[in-house]
Amino acid sequence: MTQRSDAFNDLIHSPVRLRICAALATATALEFTAIEEALELSTSALSKQLRILGEAGYVTLDKRKQPFGRPRTWVSLTLQGRRAFKAHVTTLRRLLDGDADMP
């Protein structure tokens, strides 16, 4: 999915995906369970939304082995994802300020 730098991004704009991207934008990586708990999402709902973001090239998932227990999954925004999120937020701000046409 190619977006102009000032484009409204329908894929990111979905409320759950917007919240996921906003959370991921605050860190280099977040653990799956931390996102799940912070956003109060079920495992299946978060998995589905991360799959959509991953298919667009916006997030990566990294399963890391632990000294004990199950591996943990860490989620990161890709450079493309960070750029798309930033561009979308910029467009939203411009819309709110009345500086841009509606998408």
Image (cartoon, rainbow, N blue to C red):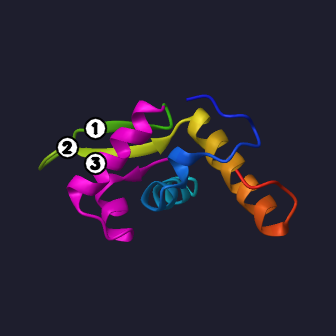
Q: Quadrant of the N terminus?
A: top right
Tell me the residue at 67%/50% (across/down): 88
Left or right placement of residue 6 versus residue 61 in this view: right
> Which mark sits nearer the N-terminus, 1 or 2?
1
> Percent from the top left, x then y, of residue 77?
51, 42
Mark 2 highlights which residue? 71
Query: Closest to the observer: 86 or 2?
Result: 2
Mark 1 touches mark 2? (CB < 8 Å): yes
Which residue occupies 51% across, 45% down? Answer: 11
Q: Earlier in the sequence, mark 1 or mark 3?
A: 3
Residue 8 located left or right of residue 41: right
Which residue in the rendered view is the most extreme toward the front? Answer: 102
Instruction: Tell me which corner region of the image, top left, top right, bottom left or bottom right, holds residue 43.
Output: bottom left
Looking at the rendered structure, the secondary structure element under dot 2 is loop
Find residue 52 and report its horizontal and vertical position in percent.
38, 40
Q: Is residue 90 above or below residue 64?
A: below
> What amino acid is found at the position of numbered circle 3 in the picture?
Ser
User: Which residue is identified by label 1?
Assistant: 63
Helix, strand or loop status at disc 1: strand
| Callout 1 crowding tier (Cα within 10 Å): few <14, some 14–19, many ≥20 | few
- Label ID, residue 4: none
The CA span between labels 2 and 3 is 16 Å
Q: Earlier in the sequence, mark 2 or mark 3?
A: 3
Q: How far is mark 1 from mark 3, CA to CA?
A: 13 Å
Q: Amino acid at mark 1?
A: Lys
Q: Is residue 35 visible?
A: yes
Q: Which mark is residue 47?
A: 3
State the residue lying farthest toward the right: 99
Q: Point out the stretch of residues depicted in magenta.
A: 29-56
Sort mark 2 into few (<14), some (14-19) or many (20+) by Cα contacts within 10 Å: few
- The location of residue 83, given as percent across then percent down, is 66, 40
Nearer to us in this view, 14 or 30: 14
